[in-house]
Image (tube, rainbow, N blue to C red):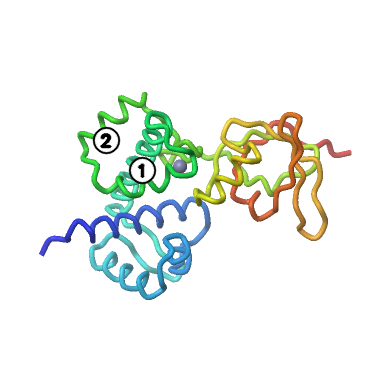
Amino acid sequence: MADSPQTTAASQEYLEWIYRLSKEQSTVQPLDLARALSVSSASVTAMLKRLVAGDLIERTQRGITLTPEGQQIAAGVVRRHTLLERLATDVLGIPWEKADEVACQLEHYVTDEVEERLAAFLGNPTTCPHGQRIDLESPDPSRPLCELGPGETAEVVRISDEDREFLSYLAALGVRPGVRLRVESLAPFNGPMTITIGESRHAIGREAASRVRVTIETQAETQ
Ligand SMILES: [Zn+2]
């Protein structure tokens, strides 16, 4: 029996997240998926069984990995997701923080033909409005902001968490891809970092800073 569209959408969502997480961290565990997808461990277990049976993932001691077929499906979902986010923000005027949600709802229903035309219409973008790459296999020279030290300047390239509240918070600080910032100081005991963007100074928690990826422009001088 063929999968219902509902099942297909759900399994695609899992494959997409396994793929995205595998690029952000060394291993992907069921708990990571439960958190990312806001579902119970029991749902994750059931879905992982189906994906293993469908030969889309493998489960080893090192966690969950995609099979070549699984990766192909996941890469397609990431591509469609990215294009739909661009459509949402750049064409439809949907706010930054809502784009991910809109794309999630539509990405499973875009045909190859629509995808191709959408890409051409949007001018073949390479990133989503939050800086996530359309091709996750392309090199990623970025580092998490939390790794920077005082005096270092950097350009924001990517927000690796598209949670709505988190994006609203960053938008209020003026942190978005393309923005230059300077790290002024780090509070002790893993306290907040003080950063400046243009003329304004902000404190940003180390945990939040770990979800903002930057490329370093000037390193701090070491004596
Ligand atoms: Zn995005």
Residue closest to the eye, 182 or 138: 182
Tell me: 30 left or right of 170. Answer: left
Side of 26 where 30 appears, left or right: left
Between the residue at mark 1 and the residue at mark 2, the CA separation in whole angstroms equals 10 Å
Query: Which residue is most to the right?
Result: 223
- How crowded pointer 1 is (Cα within 10 Å; few <14, some 14-19, many 20+) is rated as many
Q: Is residue 209 left or right of residue 141?
A: right
The kind of secondary structure element at disc 2 is helix
Residue 58 pos. (x, y %): 34, 64
Q: Quadrant of residue 213?
A: top right
- State left or right for residue 206 relative to residue 1: right
Ligand 1's quadrant: top left
State which quadrant residue 133 falls in: top left
In percent of the image, x 37 and y 52: which residue is there? Answer: 16
Quadrant that contains the C terminus: top right
Q: In this figure, which residue is indicated by the disc labeled 1? A: 81
User: Is disc 1's CB within 8 Å of ligand 1?
Assistant: yes
Q: At 46% across and 55% down in the image, what residue appears? A: 22
Residue appearing at x 40%, y 34% in the figure: 86
What residue would you read off at disc 2?
A: 115
Q: Nearer the viewer, residue 201 or 135?
A: 201
